[in-house]
């Protein structure tokens, strides 16, 4: 058997190689008696330097296995900024909750490494390995508080259902390879016509696996329990950045490889999008725990994002990526407020403005942006993705999305109403840490500035 020789051109993978070395170094440092805050800020500084590295080293690596083009760079920058914000949230949480597991920082870095490799992957095997590096790190992160039974329950559910989705996706990859006899995306495009029925079956299983990863209905059952049970900084991380990486990789596969089968996969995604928007928004209405509410909100936003993929054009896919940038800012900001207020029950948010007007105003910004109220950036990106869907002839789908956006206003603005229009139930015991305040300020300013000056993102 002839084994193809893979060119060892690592130039475009230098950012990922540096991140892998740094994450391993942090893991070794965590074995020593080193202050957790030092590990956090050391990692933050490294990620700041990783941004220009990701921009400079463009091109292909390991033959055609990885591609660091403009789209991959854009996605990597979102992942890097999101990781920095998550590290700041984790820092405040580690101090306030007295968690001694320093390896949580290394796990966060390895998860980011998997995401960066995933958005550059151009081959099925490297794609799967990158996805699993991300997923396994996330499973461990969810369970970092090993003596908390609620956390352990969330970790087990996430691992079991995540493993099921991985098995389904791997079966889809095997069918794609069986149909085309190749693993490189560029060659799959050329060979897919040899066995289109088997290829479509593989694609269907591939899509099902992706739906688990981004919690689309009816593959969403893990999200509410995991989001509620996981430590809040980890919830902020897993609710945003894995979706950025998976949607980025997923969109490129659909648009670049399976464009000729657009009718088949878009019909499937339309059903999933409608179900996700309806179920996510309706189930968010009765929630009393804010983390569960944000979990169902995240599910609903997944439905809105899928509209951009349904369009099937590069403009629609660009709208998806822009949406995920703003979604990362406003969702991480919302979970940062949960940490700051030190309260998960929505009823206990009553009257918080009387005690903490600045924090309450930041929460108002995030709730308005998640709803899609101008002049926040959430309105701009949601309008952009709806506009692309209308241009593609999916006006009826946009009408459904707009109607349920109005429904979402109830559970988002209910929190604002509680903070500003209700009498307080108790005096809140907030957490005020420098790192947490930096993250909240960055997210709030980003949502406001990019909403007022949208030409920077559209």
Image: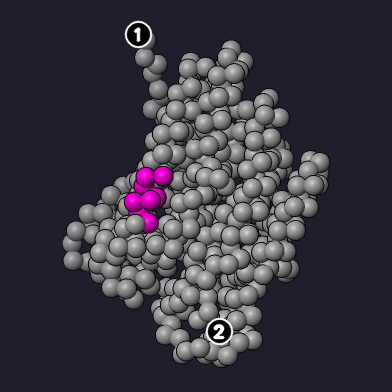
Give the colour scheme shown.
one colour
As drawn, which residue projects farthest toward the top? 1
The reply to whether the magenta stretch includes residue 414 is no
Q: Is residue 413 left or right of residue 46?
A: right
Quadrant location of the C terminus in the rendered image: bottom right
Q: Residue 73: image x %, image y %? A: 54, 46
Q: Residue at x 56, y 87 (%)?
A: 351
Give the overall secondary structure of the magenta segment.
helix
Which residue is more in the foreground, 139 or 8? 139
Lower position in the chain sequence, tag 2 or tag 1: 1
Q: Residue 281: image x %, image y %? A: 63, 59
Which residue is more in the foreground, 36 or 423? 423
Question: In which quadrant of the rendered view does residue 250 lie?
Answer: top right
Q: What residue does disc 2 label? A: 350
Q: Residue at x 38, y 51 (%)?
A: 157
Q: Label 2 crowding class (10 Å Cα cut-off): few <14, some 14-19, many 20+?
A: many
The reply to whether the magenta stretch includes residue 157 is yes
- Residue 1: mark in rendering: 1
Does dot 1 land on a helix, a strand or a loop?
loop
Q: Give the magenta range.
A: 154-161
Does dot 2 land on a helix, a strand or a loop?
loop
Asked whether residue 60 is in view, the answer is no
Q: Residue 265: image x %, image y %? A: 64, 32
Q: Residue at x 41, y 44 (%)?
A: 162
Q: Label 1 crowding class (10 Å Cα cut-off): few <14, some 14-19, many 20+?
A: few
Q: Is residue 149 above or below residue 133?
A: below
């Amino acid at each position: 058997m002839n084994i193809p020789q893979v060119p060892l051109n690592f130039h475009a993978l230098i950012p990922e190689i540096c991140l892998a070395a740094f994450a391993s170094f942090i893991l070794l440092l965590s074995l020593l008696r080193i202050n957790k805050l030092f590990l956090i800020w050391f990692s933050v500084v490294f990620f700041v330097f990783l941004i220009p590295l990701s921009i400079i080293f463009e091109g292909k690596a390991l033959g055609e296995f990885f591609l660091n083009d403009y789209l991959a760079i854009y996605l990597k920058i979102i992942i890097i900024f999101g990781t920095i914000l998550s590290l700041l949230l984790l820092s405040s949480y580690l101090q306030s909750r007295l968690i001694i597991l320093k390896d949580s920082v290394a796990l966060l870095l390895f998860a980011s490494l998997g995401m960066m490799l995933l958005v550059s992957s151009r081959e099925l095997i490297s794609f799967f390995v990158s996805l699993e590096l991300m997923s396994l790190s996330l499973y461990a992160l969810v369970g970092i508080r090993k003596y908390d039974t609620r956390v352990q329950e969330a970790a087990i559910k996430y691992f079991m259902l995540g493993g099921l989705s991985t098995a389904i996706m791997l079966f889809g990859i095997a069918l794609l390879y069986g149909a085309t006899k190749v693993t490189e995306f560029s060659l799959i495009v050329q060979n897919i016509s040899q066995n289109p029925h088997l290829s479509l079956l593989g694609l269907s299983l591939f899509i099902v696996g992706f739906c688990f990863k981004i919690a689309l209905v009816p593959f969403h059952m893990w999200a509410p329990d995991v989001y509620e049970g996981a430590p809040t900084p980890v919830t902020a991380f897993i609710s945003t950045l894995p979706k950025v990486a998976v949607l980025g990789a997923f969109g490129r596969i659909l648009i670049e490889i399976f464009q000729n089968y657009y009718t088949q996969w878009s019909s499937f995604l339309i059903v999933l999008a409608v179900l996700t928007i309806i179920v996510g928004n309706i189930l968010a209405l009765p929630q009393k725990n804010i983390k569960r509410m944000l979990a169902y909100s995240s599910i609903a936003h997944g439905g809105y994002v899928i509209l951009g993929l349904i369009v099937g054009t590069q403009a629609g896919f660009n709208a998806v990526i822009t949406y995920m940038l703003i979604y990362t800012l406003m969702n991480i900001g919302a979970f940062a407020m949960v940490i700051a207020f030190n309260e998960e029950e929505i009823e206990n948010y009553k009257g918080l403005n009387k005690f903490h007007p600045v924090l309450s105003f930041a929460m108002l910004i995030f709730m308005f942006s998640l709803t899609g109220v101008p002049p926040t950036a959430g309105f701009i990106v949601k309008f952009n993705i709806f506009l692309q869907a209308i241009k593609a002839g999916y006006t009826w789908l946009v009408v459904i999305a707009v109607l349920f956006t109005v429904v979402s206003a109830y559970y988002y603005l209910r929190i604002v109403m509680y903070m500003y229009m209700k009498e307080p139930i108790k005096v809140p015991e907030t957490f005020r840490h420098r790192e947490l305040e930096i993250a909240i300020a960055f997210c709030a300013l980003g949502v406001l500035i990019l909403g007022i000056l949208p030409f920077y993102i559209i």
